[in-house]
Image (tube, rainbow, N blue to C red):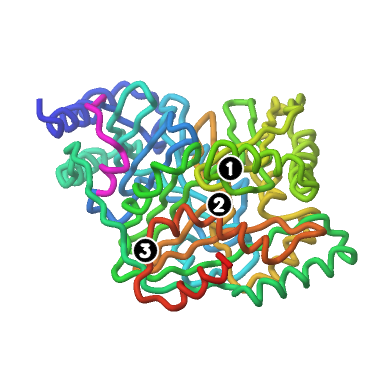
Amino acid sequence: MDLYLKIATQIKQFFGHDAIDLPLFLEGKILRIEVPIPNIEPLNWLARQQSDVKTYWSDRQGRFIMAGIGTVDTISSSSPISYPSVFGQIRQNLSSLFPNVRYYGGIGFSQDRWIDPSWKLFGNYRFVVPRFEIWTDGVGTFFACNCLGNFRSEQWDRDLDLILDELIQLDLTPLEIVIDPPVQIDRSDTPDLHEWERNINLALAKFADLKLEKIVLARKSILTFTKDLQPQLLLLLLQPNNHPSYHFCFQIDATTAFIGTSPERLYYRHDRLLKTEAIAGTRHRGASIQSDIQLSEELRSSLKDVREHQLVVDNLKLILAQLCQSVKIDRETAILKLNKVQHLYTQCQGILTPDITDTDILPQLHPTPAVGGVPRTQALKLIQELEPFERGWYAAPVGWVGADDAEFAVAIRSGLVDRNRLLLFAGAGIVTGSQSEEEWIEIENKIRHFTDLFTPVNSPTVTGHRSHIER
């Protein structure tokens, strides 16, 4: 049977017959039809669709991958987030009878700053349920259609007609896309190296007065290309060399998207089980096995990096003690090896105290010392004073929320697609003893998974920048 016909038949069956038996409490909630399909690679499929609104999420091990287009429901605002209100709306719209319905999205790093025009469409928070999804759980591949539970109103038949009209516009072939990397023509950094050195020195000078132990300062690098970028194609270029990492794309309109390959979990919750982790301290990967091991040992023995990592671990201990009735933290610090860099890594988990929800968890964990600093309040205030740009969703929570579970990553190793520009963001943890040029090079290593994709053409700005770093 033709795949389109198979899916359309299942949707008609649900609307015409299955919905009759649905319990009344599902009225107004989000319902879901799932159809097993032959293997279609989700990101390739997403890149071929014509919808302006696209959503992509892959967990760190690639066990769950979802590509979605369109929206059934959107919860968003440019006003500061009210966690009880937002998570209350999400809980109200979801049901455990449809456990695979999820809201995907994110929250701005800072809720009390002006929103830069580049981030305007994202607002301070935005969560969506896609209309159509292709998803895989490592066992099978499925097509899903989400819809509002208007099954006891006249709107129900109109919803079916609308869905079938949208369905026929989809490309359901399993074709792969041939990708030509975009041509980069310019690059600029904010702050530049001179301003970066000044900011580091200003921050370190205030450590004693503010009782700071650590602050994370970030840089924005703007790459300009010959034509508008296609966000999913960029993510396809990034994927092969960036595991284990979360991969995400939140495309808001035809020319604007936030993409990334973050290695860092903020938290995963299944019922009352909470998992989180500490990632801080960085070295680049070695060119050989021997040099890679040497760099790992150098990282383990670095007083600066160990202290930076321990600040994150100690902070998590305090937070988990407030949220959980039991806590388990790895005794030994591991090394998380990524394609371009490696980090100190400690896993943490706990059993949540009854009545603790995502409303309580998210504002406690975000921002972590790995992207903000210690103490949090003083570090965030100084970040606002020193950083000459708006972080937007960079280093903020991105992920999904379901009826009984949730998962958020920290949106590092990320970039904002704005027509023919790619705005890259990365930060460095500053502690006593930090050197500005070393931290600049660390940031350069962190964005290499993006910058290595492109060959700059006729760009004095880029050439000059690279020659300085390599010196």
Q: Secondary structure at mark 1?
A: loop
Q: Which residues are magenta?
A: 36-47
Residue drawn where x is 55% and y is 36% of the image: 289
State yes or no: residue 42 in magenta: yes
Q: How far across and how far down the image is residue 1, in percent?
A: 10, 25
Q: Are marks 3 and 1 in contact (CB under 8 Å)?
A: no
In space, the residues marked 2 and 1 are separated at their CA atoms by: 8 Å
Residue drawn where x is 46% and y is 43% of the image: 242
In space, the residues marked 2 and 3 are separated at their CA atoms by: 23 Å
Q: Which residue is mark 1?
A: 264
Q: Residues within 10 Å of mark 3 (few under 14, many from 20)?
A: few
State yes or no: residue 319 in magenta: no
Q: Is residue 394 above or below residue 15?
A: below
Report the number of numbered marks. Answer: 3
In space, the residues marked 3 and 1 are separated at their CA atoms by: 28 Å
Q: Which residue is mark 2?
A: 412
Residue 455, numbered label: 3
Residue drawn where x is 69% and y is 34% of the image: 346
Q: Amino acid at mark 2?
A: Ile
Q: Secondary structure at mark 3?
A: loop
Q: Secondary structure at mark 2?
A: loop
Q: Are marks 2 and 1 in contact (CB under 8 Å)?
A: yes
User: Which one is nearer the viewer's eye here, 21 or 105?
Assistant: 105
